Every structure is written in C-alpha cells, then in structure tokens.
Amino acid sequence: MIERTAWKPIGVTAMEAAALDAVKVRGSALVVAGPGTGKTELLGQRAGYLLQTGTCAFPRRILAISFKRDAASNLRDRVERRCGPALARQMDSLTFDAFAKQILDRFWRALPPHLAFGGAYGIAPFFSKDTFNELQRSAASGLQTEGHPAHWARTQLNVNATENGIYGVNLDAFNKAIQTLRLEPLTVTDHAQFLQVVQLRTTLTSPAPHLGFPMIGRLAQAIVASNPQIRRALCATYGHVFLDEFQDTTSVQYDLIATIFKGMTASLVAVGDDKQRIMGWAGARDDVFAAFSTDFLGGPDDLARVVLTQNFRSNQRIVTILNTLKQRLAPTEPDFIAARPAPALPDEEICAVLVAQDEDGEAAAVATQVAKSVAEGVDPRHIGLLVRQKAIDWEPRLAKAFAAAGVAFRNEDRDVGGATIQDLMTEAYPRVLVDFLELLTRRHGGVLWTAALGHLAMVSGLIQDDDPDTERALALSLATFHDAHRLQGVASSAGLQQAITDIEHFLHLDRLKSISPQYATGDFFERIRAATKAFLLEGATSGGTWTQLLERFRGAGQVPLLTITKSKGLEYSLVILLGLNDDQWWSFSKNPAEGRSVFFVAASRARDRLLMTRCGYDGSSKIAEIFQALDEVGVKARAV
C-alpha cells in the first residue's frame, strides 16, 4: 500500500497540474479534456491512485463507463499495465449499454408490474425506416381496438393522440425521442412519446421480445428507482465512478447514473469535451455538462469544470489549426498547448487542401499521397481516410486508384455478416479466437502464450497469478492443446473451420459467452461469432499462409477508411479528410454547431499531417466557414 502523499503517476514523467488534481480528487469532478490531452491516461492514473493507495479498498470497486467497447477495453488494459492484474480486477470497465444490461439481466424480476416480462429477450437494432413505418401503421389501426398496445397506451397513459397525429412523427424524431422516454405511468401528449410507449408495450408482451439498448437502459432505471435496496447495493459496491466521453451521454444513460448515484457518497469523475459533441443525432444530451454540475458538484471536495490544455497528440502546426477551430466552438476556453513541435517541412506538406477536377482525380491524388507516405515508412494502419457520409459509397471511387498505386485500403464500416469490421476488431470473442489461432501458428508463443494463458484462466473462472499450482495446471493444459493442433502450411477454409471448432471446444463455447457482459442473453454472441467466422473464411479464400490470413483479418498493410463519427478516440500519423464538398456536408447549414464539431473531431485525429480533398472550387459552399477558418491559419489549397 502506498501513502497518498507519496503516490506518483505511473509510467509517465509528469502530468498537467489540472489533470493531477482530477486524479487525486476526493469528491467528484468534471474534466473538459480536449483531443490529445490524455483523458484515458487521466482515468488510468486515477484508477492506479485509488487502488494503490487503498482509497478504493476491497470489497469496494471502481465502475468505469465508456461510450464504446474499444474505449472500455483500452482503459481496462491500461489499468492492468499500471497496477497489475490483481488490483485491476477491482475495476469494472464497461460500456453504458453493458452496465444497463447487467442490471436488467440480474434484476428483471424486480421490474414494476406495468413493465414486467418473462426475462428472456433479444437485442433489437436501431429502428429502421421499414420497422418504424410498420409501427406507425400498427399504432394507427389499434387506437380504437381494445387489447391492442396502442389502445392500452392511450387509456392507461391518457395519451391525447389521433390517427392523423401519429403519422406526423418522423423516424429521426422517434429515434432521438426514445432517449427521453419515461417508463413510469404518466400522461404523455407528444406523438413520438406515444409511439415509443406502443412499441415498448408491444415488445414486452410478445413471446420473444427484442429490446433496443435505450429500452434496456430505461428498464434498468425503472428497476433501481422502484427498489431502494438494489440502489443501496450498487452504491455499496461502487465507491468510485468514471464517466468517459461524457459529451456523448444520452438522456437514458445519464438518467440511469443519476438514479443510482445522485445524493449518495460515491465519487464521480466525468471526462469529456463538449467541443466534440457529434452524437446529437443519436440522442446525446445537449445540457449533460450542466446537469452533472447541478447534480454532483458543489461540495467542498469537488472540482468544477477543470479544463486540460496540453495536447500530446498533434504537432504545433496542427494544434494551431485546432485552436482556430476551437474559437468557433468554445471561445472562452484557453488555447491548446502543443507538446510536440512541427516537423521541419513546408507548411503545405503538413496541412493542405488538395483540389481535384473530378472524383477520379480526387481518388488518384489520395492514392498517390498514401503510396508516398507508405514508401517513406509510415505504417498503412497509421493513415486514416476519413469521410463525412457513408464509407461504402467511397469504396468504388478509391478502389481503382489504390490498385494502380499498389496500396490496399479497407472499409472499416463494411458489414461482414451481422457486424462491421471495426466492431469486430473491438469484440472480446474474435480477440480471443484470433490470439489462439495465431498461437497455433507458432512453435514458441512468447507474448501470445501469455495472452492465451490469460484467456484460458478467464474462461475457466480462475485467477492465474494468485496460485502457482493453478498457473502450472493451466500452462500444462495449454501446452497439450498447442502441441496437438499446430497450424502449418497453406491456410484453407476447411482447416480454418476445424481450428475454430477445436479452439471453441478447448475453451468451452458456453464459457466463452461469459467473457463479455453483452453476450449473456439474446443472440448477440452468436451474431458476433458468425460474423467473425465469415470474415476469417473470407480471408481464407485469398490463399496464403496462416499468418497472412490473420494479418488480413487484423488489417495489416491496409489503410483504414471510416467515417468521422467512427474515428472518435482514434489517431493517425496522416489524416486525409475526403470530400470537402456540399454533397458530403449538406447538413452543415442546418446544424452548424454540430458541423463545426464534426470537422474539429476529424482534424484532431492527426498527429503529424492533415490533408483534405475536394472536387473543384465553389465560393458559395455550404462549408465556406470551414475554408475561412483554414485560410486564417494559412492552410493553402493546391490543384492536383
């Protein structure tokens, strides 16, 4: 145990003073952490401080909640590296959705009567236009039909709605309004609310309900709100709570946290950046920073709105651009301070707008720039091709030019059998499976052996590092499996399917479902499992060795293509932002605040170089404001 006054940050030489204050805060804190300022490092250091000083002493735990699965996994790994696996096991690093799902799966019998259901359910996707239209038709036809969920909602909730009014709700309003749905019996006059209630009631009364994650969050909140003993148990378990990417928090997610922890003794540290709030379309709450300040701050040990300014990611030239963009988003905040100087290159080599005559010219210019960077030694995975709209629309535009330049790229948003490639790269099941497949290609495992041994201990429910006899037994079991199932020679579809079967049998398929909370119920595990197999088999048809197959799966040698939204939390040595044209940024004039944030997020992904492309010059562009900001800091446009 380390004395609090003697504790020092782990693995770093120093931290920004404001960040260190947040690491050691005794109460709650709101931290504004702009791009590259080290928010994940801050949370990792805080976990180390709490665990190593005994401030969070067993049996109390840390609850770390992230917006995305990869962020939750990265934080968990970082804390384990800082503190070791034994202490790291005192932290639960989950997404909001996984946390809500755990509460529902464990306590569904405690739901209030008007929300009760049988317990078993599947995971429903975000509402599509077709399913939404069917809901509208169903609600309209059922208004006057006794026993129909629409009639129930109208009579039980005193909904003042008519058939004509229901048709006036659009899909976007419905998906966003789900985030504000209240599940307790009340009077609802908004038509979108009415449709939500109809859909919820229809779902809960069906033989095989499928719940969307906003519904799961609201049901979890209803459980806590109606059962004080469950709330007390959660607060007794978690004395410290981390809230990551806080600007993306929806009403559902915030209300669940507030229902559990508001007015209790837990310390909550929320870290985010309202300049990067680009998830409004998905229900991100506009006033979430103000709500947190009102609900959780104000005590003598609290820190109110600490702003981090040290940018450890981007070089000085790019930081200058970010500061100019920041003035349009948060003019009262202090400027970022670059930790790295700009390289000794002309400014136009670091940041520029490349202007092509047409789409073919644009694609050729991008491929040329990428090929040049790869030839100079930049790893293709460290180059990010970012687009505002659907990445799938850019694949045919880029394919011919990249093939001619001899460089591979991969659309990270492509569906490969029920999941996107990017999602698969963050899931627990494919990570375990691919680690084992790679181990079987090696005579000696090295770090792969250690990883596989950790996976085996996890699925076995054992603590490998606390008992030498347990570790020896696990190692012997793994060695026997490794010797009997080596993979050599050319990869084949049949050999791959057999290897997957062998690994699943060794680890026990039913136990693999326990490695991630979202696998516990419904068909999500099977969907991820099927998508993983489909993508691996797709690679097997290309021929080559087993090592090459696994490298293709991980994207080695392939430049990632993804939307700006999906790039949140990532960074690249070279960012090429494609399509600075009105057809891609058509919504900017409708919501300029979000448009500025989207561009800010894209630019802030760059470590060393930031290039942007467009087709033609247009002085009346909808994003003229962006070009004006770039011009203010000397970013030049050049024809290609």
Image (spheres, rainbow, N blue to C red):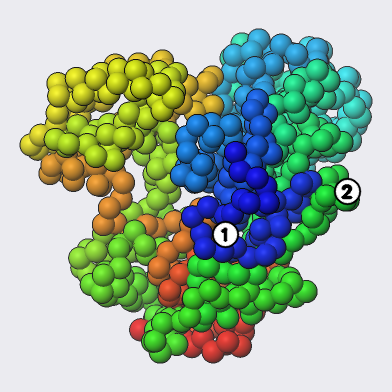
Give the answer, above or below, for where 332 lies relative to 453.
below
Which tag is nearer the camera, tag 2 or tag 1? 2
Q: Earlier in the sequence, mark 2 or mark 1?
A: 1
Can residue 155 be seen here? yes
Picture quadrant of residue 549: top left
Marks 2 & 1, CB-CB < 8 Å contact: no
What residue sits 30% from the left and 63% below the top? 379
Which quarter of the figure is the N terminus placed in? top right
Report x, y in % for residue 478. 25, 23
SS label for mark 1: loop
Q: Nearer the viewer, residue 12 or 612?
A: 12
Provide the residue designation for mark 2: 299
Can residue 539 be seen here? no
Report x, y in % for residue 132. 64, 35
Provide the residue designation for mark 1: 38
Q: Nearer the viewer, residue 270 or 43?
A: 43
Report x, y in % for residue 609. 43, 75
What residue sits 43% from the left and 33% below the top? 428
Report x, y in % for residue 477. 25, 18
